[in-house]
Amino acid sequence: MVDYPQMLHTVLDTPNARELADFYRHLLGFHYRPGDEPPTDADADDNPDWLVLTDDAGNHKLAFQQVDELKRTTWPKHEIPMQLHVDYTVPTIEELQRQRARAESLGATILFDRSDDKTEPLYVFADLAGHPFCIFVA
């Protein structure tokens, strides 16, 4: 018997499930759950309403749910709050800078730069759908 519910994955709403799944697949090195891969037939419809990414062991990590509309956060302003964000860590400031460049090359935008902080350097990014996420040195 299990004493507590077990987390399966975190689900992100997005107006483009494939695009956002690809962003995180490249950023984090995850894989599509079998059956969620992009179609190989150029004429096939690739407008999924639900996709799942897994780690190398096949554990579910992130899922993406297609929605018609998603209002982007205005953080650090408070009109539309973050509602949720995910934190990722790297071991060094050099790796933080490398991951910043990778995230931006994949389409992320910087919302907040605290990379010069002596105790916890970090960047807060927005992904392609506007979800905030942090990468910091821990």
Image (spheres, rainbow, N blue to C red):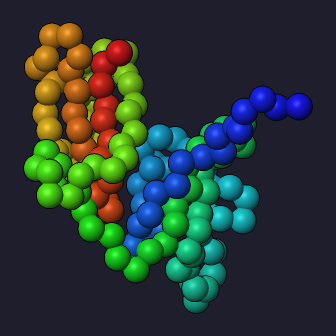
9 horizontally vs 137: left or right? right
Kindly give the residue lying farthest to the front in the view shown.
3
Q: Position of residue 69 (x, y in %)?
A: 34, 76
- The residue depicted at 31 percent of the width and 31 percent of the height is 135
Q: Quadrant of the C terminus?
A: top left
- The residue depicted at 37 percent of the width and 22 percent of the height is 90
Report the label total: 0
Q: Position of residue 85 (x, y in %)?
A: 36, 43
Q: Quadrant of the N terminus?
A: top right
Kindly give the residue lying farthest to the bottom in the view shown.
43
- The residue depicted at 37 percent of the width and 47 percent of the height is 84
Q: Nearer the viewer, residue 19 or 70?
A: 70
87 horizontally vs 82: left or right? right
When asked about the image quadrant of residue 8, the answer is top right
Residue 39 is at least partly visible in this image: yes
Does 115 appear above or below 70?
A: above
78 horizontally vs 67: left or right? left
Residue 105 is at least partly visible in this image: no
- The residue depicted at 25 percent of the width and 62 percent of the height is 72
Q: Position of residue 45 (x, y in %)?
A: 58, 85
Does 138 appear above or below 49?
A: above
Q: Position of residue 4 (x, y in %)?
A: 72, 33
Kindly give the residue lying farthest to the right in the view shown.
1
Q: Nearer the viewer, residue 92 or 84?
A: 84
